[in-house]
Image: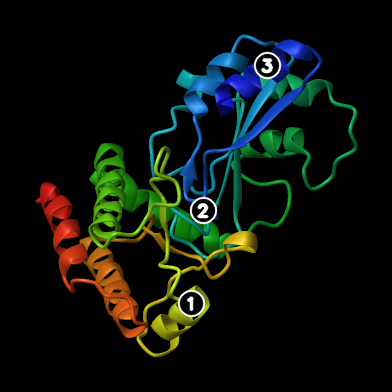
Amino acid sequence: MGLVADVKAHLDKNKNIKGVLIQGSETSTAVAHPIEEIAKLVKNMDETLLVVDGITALGVTDIPMDEWGIDVLLTGSQKALMLPPGLALIALSEKAWRFCERTKTPGFYFNLKAERKNLKDNTTAYTPAVSLIIGLHKVLEMIFEDGLAKMFADNDRFARATRAGFKALGLKLLAPDSPATSVTGVYLPESVDGGKLVKWLRDDFGVTFAGGQDQLKGKIIRVSHMGYVDSADILIAIGSIEMGLKKFGYNIEMGKGVAAAQEVLLEGY
């Protein structure tokens, strides 16, 4: 069964489920989740909320919260919003606000009713991270100056270019069936130590990549293409990995991955 079918089976079996919690995309596995399809399962369930972790999806791909029927959408400042960590942002549907109104769970800092009341007075319930809010204002100015459509299209192009570059090098995608737009992960050749490769690229070559976690540690490499990224960053990433693989003994045709990425990137010019 697929993810959507699994969720539907659980909802059909247990009518008392109060929430379906899911990520828009997951950076550790570089996979995107079928939020729109799952939202359709929950949209007309009055006593069930769909809660979406959009930390690596919001600002990367279009997530029309009201149109799809997402009840709670969360994000943070440190990913696509191009800021240091420290801000958590949350949006609620009217259905979710009805849950808040009748909840008996004690709350203080996470008292959303108090926050909503203060927002109407253009303030916050508690001391905010003022510098980050000022930074967020600037980020949103940048985003809306270019337009959401361009931002989504650019992110999609960067993702496709990165995947094309890796595939041209013969590397297998970590999530080939449902790749995230925010990050691309690929399996490294078995002969290459992923830990040593990432360390060399960072310390000796000056380009930082993410490796794998848990059972994927030392086996994959991940490239972020969300937030403050442009075409040159994608070419640097692919070119650096080409050189790193060559240094660690993997026989590749230098420039092949960069050329494949360039073909996709040119679509935007």
The front one of 51 and 14 is 14
Judged by depth in the image, the label closer to the viewer, 1 or 2, is: 1
User: Which secondary structure, mark 3?
Assistant: helix
The amino acid pointed to by label 1 is: Asp
Amino acid at pointer 2: Thr
Identity of the amino acid at label 3? Ala
For the image, the number of numbered tags is 3
Could you say which disc has been placed on residue 232 in the image?
Answer: none
Query: In the image, 263: left or right of 228?
Result: left
Question: Along the polypeptide, which appears first: circle 1 or circle 2?
Answer: 2
Disc marking residue 27: 2
Q: Is residue 219 left or right of residue 8?
A: left
N-term mark: 1 or 3? 3
Q: Quadrant of residue 204?
A: bottom left
Secondary structure under the numbered disc 1 in the rendered image? loop
Q: Which is more foreground, mark 3 or mark 2? A: 3
Quarter placement of the N terminus: top right
Q: Secondary structure at mark 2?
A: loop
**What residue is drawn where x is 44% and y is 32%?**
63
Above-or-below relation of 64 to 147: above
Residue at (48% x, 20% y) in the render: 68
Give the crowd class for mark 2: few <14, some 14-19, many >=20 residues within 10 Å: many
| Place of residue 47 in the rendered image (x, y in percent of width and height, measured from the top left) | 74, 14
Q: Which residue is mark 3?
A: 9
Is residue 48 left or right of 250 when viewed as pictured? Answer: right
Give x and y (percent) for residue 31. Answer: 48, 44
Mark 1, other Cα within 10 Å: few <14 / some 14–19 / many ≥20: some
Measured from the top left, where is residue 182 in percent x and y? 41, 50
